[in-house]
Image (cartoon, rainbow, N blue to C red):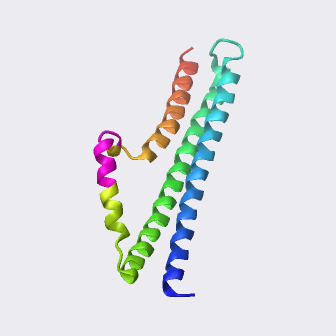
Amino acid sequence: MSPEQYLWEMAVQNLEYCRHHENQRQAVTNFAITLAGALLTVVSLDQKITRLDLLPALLVMLVGLHGMITSWKHSERFHFHYCRFRQSRDMLDKKLGVSIKSLNQIADQEHDSQFPRFNKISSHRFWFLSHITIILIGTSLCIISLIV
C-alpha cells in the first residue's frame, strides 16, 4: 500500500466515524423526544396537573439533560474525527501536489454567499435546542405541579 493510499484510507475511516457520531446524535435526540412525549402523555392522562405529576416532570427534565450531554459528546467526537480527516487530507494534498483544501474554500465561499444567515449558526446548536426545549418543558411542569 502506498503512502497516498494509506492517507486516503485514514481520511475515509475518519469520515465514517464522523457519520457514525452524527447518526448516534440523531438517534439519541429521537429517543429523547419520544420518551419525553410518552412522559408528557402520562402527565396529561387525567387532564390536570397535580403533585403526582412531579415525578414524570422530573423524568422529562432528566431525559432532556441526558440527551443534551450525550448530544454534546457526539458533537465533540464528530469534531475530533473531522480534525483528523482534515490532517489526512492536507497531508495528501502535499503529497499529490493538488489542493483539495483550496477547492473546498472556493466552494465554501460560494455556498456562504447563497446562505449568509444560516452559516452563522452551527448545526449542533439546533440539536441542543431540542434538548433544551425538553428540559424547559420538564422544568415548567415541575414548577406548575408544585404550585398547584
Q: Residue at x 50, y 32 (%)?
A: 133
Q: Residue at x 54, y 55 (%)?
A: 74
In the displayed structure image, the side of residue 16 where residue 76 appears, left or right: left
Q: Nearer the viewer, residue 6 or 84?
A: 6
In the displayed structure image, the side of residue 95 where residue 25 appears, left or right: right
Residue 50 percent coordinates (x, y):
64, 16
In the displayed structure image, the side of residue 121 where residue 138 appears, left or right: right
Q: Nearer the viewer, residue 92 or 34?
A: 92
Q: Residue furthest bottom?
A: 2
Magenta stretch contains residue 116: yes
Q: With respect to residue 133, does 76 lie above or below?
A: below
The quarter of the rendered structure image containing the N terminus is: bottom right
Residue 70 percent coordinates (x, y):
56, 50
Q: Nearer the viewer, residue 91 or 81?
A: 91
Magenta-drawn stretch, dominant element (helix, strand or loop): helix
Magenta stretch contains residue 70: no
The quarter of the rendered structure image containing the C terminus is: top right
Q: With respect to residue 55, does 24 lie above or below?
A: below
Residue 32 percent coordinates (x, y):
62, 39
Q: Residue at x 52, y 45 (%)?
A: 68
Q: Nearer the viewer, residue 116 or 64?
A: 116
Quarter of the image for residue 31 reads top right
Residue 36 percent coordinates (x, y):
63, 32
Q: Which residues are magenta?
A: 108-118
Q: Residue at x 50, y 71 (%)?
A: 11
